[in-house]
Amino acid sequence: MGQDPTRRHSKEIVPAGVRIAFRDLWKEIRIARIVLASAPKFKALRGKRALRVHLGCGTEIKPGWVNIDLQLKPPVIHKDAAPETIYINHDLRRGLPLEKGACAMIYSSHFFEHLEYSDAVALLHDCYEALAPGGVFRAALPNFRDAFKAYLRGDWEPFAILDTYKLMPPMKPSIKTLTDYITYCVYQYGEHKWIMDEQKMTVLLSDIGFKSVALSSFREDVDPPNEVRRTGSFYIEAIK
């Protein structure tokens, strides 16, 4: 059967740019509705202290933590989950609406690089305000420095794990180069918005007001036991 000429004509008279704009507008409308729906959950946390908050949690729900992420299909908290396990579907580009001094710890893993730089810095300020004195901000972030070092010395071995877990796009082995691995690490299909390293994060956190900022090692009690994350991350902790 031939293509419906009416459908073909309708696509031709609506420019691609307009279709994309409408699609993005509809997505933002859906996100705005999600943010409005999250307000009661944040309100229920008022007055609580020593909260542990997991930003950009994805599908990794930390037991006993307040887990926050934006997902059109949010995870379901199991009825037998640890007490105080909470998931809030929220767009963190709109800020972190928690009371000042409510948190004992705020954690994220490979999340801040997915925000625009200005949104990331604003959220770091919100984290500082939400932490109680002596509270800890901890983040696991992509270790671009080691990836660049491996590239410069022509070392393929550190990137092998990306093929093992099939994270790289399909590509003929004969045309795959080290540049392709660097492209994935830096851009990750356009999801990464900016590059940070140990120095940049230390300067940012110190400028925001954290008293102590230091690099850390992997912590089994907090960091996910994900081999890709563990081999491709650096860890930083800041104390308010």
Image: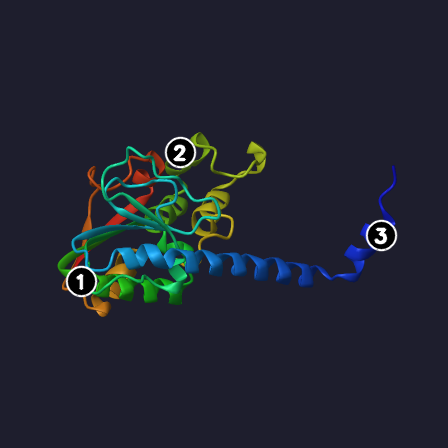
Residue 30 at x, y percent in the picture: 52, 56
The residue under the point 40% across, 34% down is 161
Q: CA distance from mark 2 to mark 3?
A: 49 Å
Q: Quadrant of the C terminus?
A: bottom left
Residue 165 at x, y percent in the picture: 43, 32
Q: Residues within 10 Å of mark 2 (few under 14, many from 20)?
A: some
Question: Regarding mark 3 in the picture, which secondary structure is present there?
Answer: helix
- The residue identified by callout 3 is 6
Residue 204 at x, y percent in the picture: 27, 65
User: Marks 3 and 1: in contact by CB < 8 Å?
Assistant: no
**Mark 2 or 3, which is nearer the eye?**
3
Q: CA distance from mark 1 to mark 3?
A: 60 Å
Please tell me in which quadrant of the rendered image residue 151 appears. top left
User: In front: 120, or 78?
Assistant: 78
Q: Residue furthest left?
A: 134
- The residue identified by callout 1 is 101
Q: Quadrant of the N terminus?
A: top right
- The residue identified by callout 2 is 161
Q: Residues within 10 Å of mark 1 (few under 14, many from 20)?
A: some
Q: Which label belongs to residue 80?
A: none
Q: CA distance from mark 1 to mark 2?
A: 40 Å
First in sequence, mark 1 or 3: give its number. Answer: 3
Q: Amino acid at mark 2?
A: Ile
First in sequence, mark 1 or 2: give its number. Answer: 1
Question: Regarding mark 1 in the picture, which secondary structure is present there?
Answer: loop
User: In front: 199, or 32?
Assistant: 32
